[in-house]
Image (spheres, grey):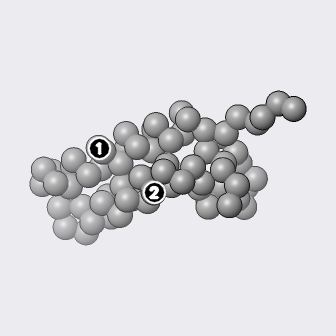
Amino acid sequence: MKKNMGTTDKIIRILLAIVFAALYFTGTVTGTWGIVLLVLAAIFLLTSLVSFCPLYLPFNISTSKKKQD
């Protein structure tokens, strides 16, 4: 698993995860939509921690900086 996420991408995902979790746990968004947001928050947090997004693979996207040799 090659890293394909840059720092900015990870920060945005972590911030979105915090917002989604806050919306769920404060009761602003409930029911099915609340659960969907909570699952998305978990996915965003997990992908940020491992610096890999599987959805980037089919499109050959990488937001990480290339190392210069």
Q: Where is 21 relative to 39, above or below?
A: above
Please tell me whether mark 2 or mark 1 is closer to you in this view: 2
Q: Quadrant of the N terminus?
A: bottom right
Q: Name the kind of residue labelled 2 in the image.
A: Leu
Residue at the spot of label 2: 46
Residue at x 75% of width, y 53% of height: 60
Viewed as shown, does residue 8 lie left or right of 32? right
Q: Quadrant of the C terminus?
A: top right
The residue most toward the right is 69
Is residue 29 something one can see in this rendering?
A: no
Viewed as shown, does residue 17 lie left or right of 7? left
Badge 2 marks a residue whose secondary structure is helix
Q: Position of residue 27 (x, y in %)?
A: 12, 54
Q: Position of residue 8 (x, y in %)?
A: 54, 33
Q: Position of residue 16 (x, y in %)?
A: 37, 44
Q: Position of residue 45 (x, y in %)?
A: 42, 52
Identify which residue, 4 or 35, lies in the foreground. 4
Q: Where is 22 relative to 6, above or below?
A: below
Identify which residue, 33 or 67, lies in the foreground. 67
Residue at x 70% of width, y 45% of height: 62
Viewed as shown, does residue 31 lie left or right of 9? left
Task: Name the mark on residue 19.
Answer: 1
First of labels 2, 1 by sequence position? 1
Between the residue at mark 2 and the residue at mark 1, the CA separation in whole angstroms equals 15 Å
